[in-house]
Image (tube, rainbow, N blue to C red):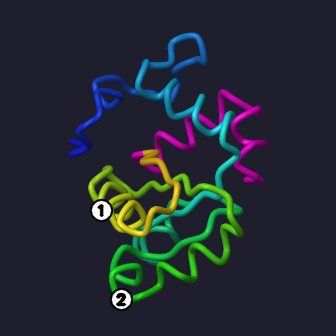
Amino acid sequence: LRSCLCPCWSADMSNMTAEEMPQDVKAIKDWIVQNKPFMLDVRSAGEVASNNIPGVLNISIQELNSGSVAKAKEAANGRPLGIYCASGGRSRMAVELFNQQKYPCFNCHTVDTMKYVFRVSPEAKQAAGVV
């Protein structure tokens, strides 16, 4: 059971086509295509090792809370951040951290949401610069 607050998890997206994309997930895809973000995964290194998206920077929420916000902003090089985690909670906390510093970002919710978006939308995958 997912603890994500977004309604995208009311359905199994593993075999879902682009035409069946839930509206909240479509909003994430559209934001990525329009903003060409730098993607940031705020899960722990262990979580990323077992389920990752190649080409995405990983800085855990604990590291961000310990002062690594500057590292993420430097890596993004002025691009907005598309932030995700496992269930949406840590990405929400990270978005709050970056909002406090007036740095543009968007909560992309979960790694599984992002894998789905990148699977069904090559345009979003290219815009985010992931392989």
Labelled pair 1, 2 in contact (Cβ < 8 Å): no
Would residue 111 appear left or right of 54 to someone viewing this image? left
Vertical arrangement, residue 43 with respect to residue 17, above or below:
below
Residues packed near mark 2 inside 10 Å, few (<14), some (14 to 19) or many (20 plus): few
Tell me what residue is drawn at x 69 percent, y 36 percent: 124
- How much space separates mark 1 and mark 2, taking CA atoms? 13 Å
Residue receiving disc 2: 66
**Count of numbered tags:** 2
Would residue 5 appear left or right of 35 to someone viewing this image? left
What label sits on residue 93 in the rendered view? 1
Residues packed near mark 1 inside 10 Å, few (<14), some (14 to 19) or many (20 plus): some
Tell me what residue is drawn at x 53 percent, y 82 percent: 70
Is 70 in front, or is 55?
70
Secondary structure that dominates the magenta span = helix
Give the extent of the magenta segment: 109-131
Is 100 in front, or is 63?
100
Vertical arrangement, residue 66 with respect to residue 73, above or below:
below
Is 74 in front, or is 113?
74
